[in-house]
Image: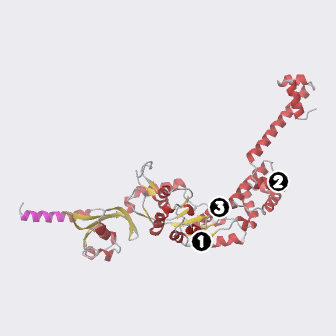
Amino acid sequence: MGKENVRFSKELNEGALEIILDFAHSGVLIINCDRVITNINQWGCDFFGLRREDMLYRDTTEIFPGSELVKVLETREVQKNRVTVRNNKKISITRSPIFKNGRLLGAIAVFNEYNAMNAAEETQIGSLLAEKGLVAKYHFSDIVYRSEALGYSVSLAQSYAKTNSPILITGESGTGKELFAQSIHNASDRKHKPFVALNCATLSESILESELFGYADASFTGAKKGGKVGLFQLANGGTLFLDEIGEIPLSFQAKFLRALQEMQVRPVGSDTIIPVDVRIIAATNKNLMEEVEQGNFRLDLLYRINVLTLPVPPLRERKEDLEDLAWHYFNQKDPAVYQEHSKTIHQVVEGLKAYSFPGNVRELDNMLQRLYLLLTEGLLAQTMPEILAQLVEGMPLVETMEKKKNLSLEEEEREQLIAALVEQKGSRKKTADALGISTATLWRKMKKFHIE
């Protein structure tokens, strides 16, 4: 091929490349080894709202500070399907170095709007939200109290609801920390977005990572076909509540901290970095500073989640709330039972004020359930010490009701014996024959039931 033909073919290819770039439905940006922009197509110009002449032959960091494309020049590594935000829009970018004959010439970025490319995934997330009912049920109006101690916590939580800062809720087990978390969410600007909760206790590092970050298709043996959306993504725009945060394995805490700092997650087995907008509310029944001193919890992670602290007092420090809590339980369960037994319930509550409630409100709720069954089944003991023993010591209701059932059967058998004796005019032989038992058995039963 002559020189003229070579020159013409080169010009033809360059011209065709320009047409291909401008007809592409993706943005294309090319830089050379000096970080200078050598080409950008029309789609990319329109997306950034800039003219091509204002971008060409300028250092890319002047327009895109901290450009990852510059890092690709340094690392010479391909970045596939990375998600980031530009012009308040999520975009998916693939970046790659450009080589020819083993020599680095520059780097190229190909990008598109994330939402357009991931409509199926967004639909999947929406379906999961509807299916799982990822909403907060409780509001501050559902918190029952009259004590100053809990009133302070409620006021503090209401003020925290106006911010987007992370909150650490502290308190013993059973004090109602999730009730506060849901109330904060429902009083915030995020109330129409998802509320997603996870109890971190006893979960291994691998399970936590796949639950929080999700995983790609076929990322590990046993993985769900098509992958799984993580809780960070499910909670996007809303609130992620992490209960028992002190139980997170130390080996996972660095990954978790990075996700909180960057507000980005990468599903297990995927190269895609996904930005998220999530408000973190964590809860613990541990002293996390002591956990830090013992080497079980990272100090930098504690600072990240403990921007705002919300203490929830134990029930033993607010005994004045017992009466209202009991009334609220029976009013929700069966107001008629409360009206019928209000005096007894009041006496029981007074007696329970001497109890320490190691299980807090959760334990009280169990006691009130037991009290309700004892009242409606007629099994409540006669004296207050016995009643309190039934509630506090937790006499098994199944056993108690079984005893009542057995007593009923015995009473029924006694009545049958008496009726048979009357019918046979007191003749034991005829009665035994009518019942199909021996006279000796009849005699034993009469003696058992005190029948003359």
Q: 370 and 294: which one is in front?
A: 294
Q: Which residue is mark 3?
A: 173
Q: Residue at x 65, y 61 (%)?
A: 173
Q: Residue 14's image quarter?
A: bottom left
Q: Crowdedness of circle 3 by 10 Å Cα count: few (<14), some, many (20+)? A: some
Q: 49 and 157: which one is in front?
A: 157
Q: Is residue 5 magenta?
A: yes
Q: Which residues are magenta?
A: 3-15
Q: Is residue 90 magenta?
A: no
Q: Crowdedness of circle 2 by 10 Å Cα count: few (<14), some, many (20+)? A: few
Dominant secondary structure of the residues highlighted in magenta in the image: helix
Q: Is residue 388 left or right of residue 116?
A: right
Quadrant of the image for the N terminus?
bottom left
- Image location (x, y in percent) of residue 236: 48, 63
Q: Which residue is mark 1?
A: 309
Q: 210 and 408: which one is in front?
A: 210
Mark 2 or mark 3, earlier in chain: 3
State the SS at label 3.
Answer: loop
Q: Residue at x 56, y 61 (%)?
A: 247
Give amino acid for label 1.
Thr
Between marks 2 and 3, how big is the CA–CA gap?
A: 28 Å
- Image location (x, y in percent) of residue 221: 43, 48
Q: Is residue 104 left or right of residue 152?
A: left
Q: Kindly identify which numbered label has been placed on residue 386.
A: 2
State the SS at label 2.
Answer: helix
Dot 1 and dot 2 residues touching (CB under 8 Å)? no
